[in-house]
Amino acid sequence: MTAESLAELGRKLDRIVSEYLKLRYQGGKVISFPSGKGGVGKTAITINLAAALALKGKRVLVMDLNFALPNIHMFLDEAPEATLTHYLGGEAELDEVIGKVFVKDTHFDVAPSESIVDFKKKINIEKLNDAISLLKTRYDCLLLDPAPGLSKYVFYPVRLSDHVFIVSADVRPAYMDAMKVLKLLETSKINHEGFIVNMVRGSELKYFAAMNVFAVIPYDGHLKKAFLAGRTVFHSKMGFLSPSKKYFEKMADEISSTFLSNSQST
């Protein structure tokens, strides 16, 4: 190999390293929200946080990774041609699976899923890595909403995440399942940023009082009503009556300042 060839190879390697570092440190952040138990409001938290972040000027994509009982599709204002399940099954391209949710004068994007119970082909969850690597260059944050539990469809996305929040409710069954998630993360040497405790009644936590709690969301009938209608609390003209609204705004502020400071919003 000539000196000129070596020099050209060196320049190519420098460009590759430069692009990698740009993606790694200045690309969007991947945030996942595992939960041990279903019914703790994980999807409601993810979708409302997405709206709060979008209203603060962040480019946000929510990825529905609940391949058993997906439901984020019910929030879509513009549905994509296919779903994330089709992409992971090799039947669609990535750009074909992204839809939009409009909120006030902005929007956030959603990659919905289809239940693998109805899907005729197996999916390759490891293909998610390719999708995330590309999408990190387009968004300030990717919010991953996995299924409850500890299956490979939960663990693999969590491993790909930059930040992990365990979602639970302050009741004993949910707390016990959240501890199982925590143990799995610790055994796998995966750091988490704390618990998001949802549907809290009263001013003090019972089971999570001594834990690392990132955010507390109070019980909110407005939040439940909006969720069942396929909307966030930020869509409602009466959203100011929602006690959880300001908590989502506060959480979005903290996530933006702490984890998304290197993101490049447009």
Image: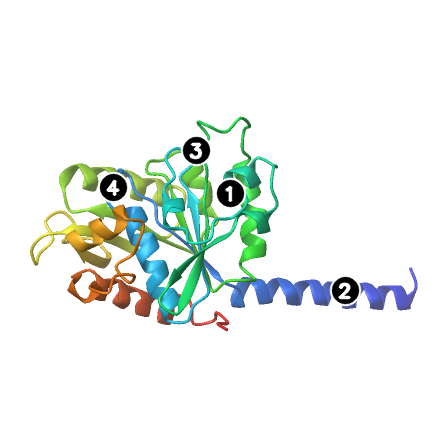
* CA gap, disc 3 and disc 1: 10 Å
212 up-or-down from 266: above or below? above
Q: Circle 1: is it few (<14), some (14-19), or many (20+) Cα within 10 Å?
A: many
C-alpha gap between disc 1 and disc 2: 34 Å
Determine crowd level at label 3: few under 14, some 14-19, many 20+ residues with C-alpha closer than 10 A: some
The kind of secondary structure element at disc 1 is helix
Amino acid at the residue labelled 2: Lys
Look at mark 3 in the image and give the residue it sits on: 115
Look at discs 2 and 3 and give the one toward the viewer: 3
Sequence-first tag of 3 and 4 = 3
- Disc number placed over residue 12 in the picture, else none: 2
Q: Residue 86 placed where, x, y %?
A: 55, 38
Q: Nearer the viewer, residue 104 or 223?
A: 104
Residue holding disc 1:
84
Q: Give the residue type that dot 4 points to.
A: Met
Classify mark 4: helix, strand or loop.
helix
Residue at image point 28% right, 48% down: 229
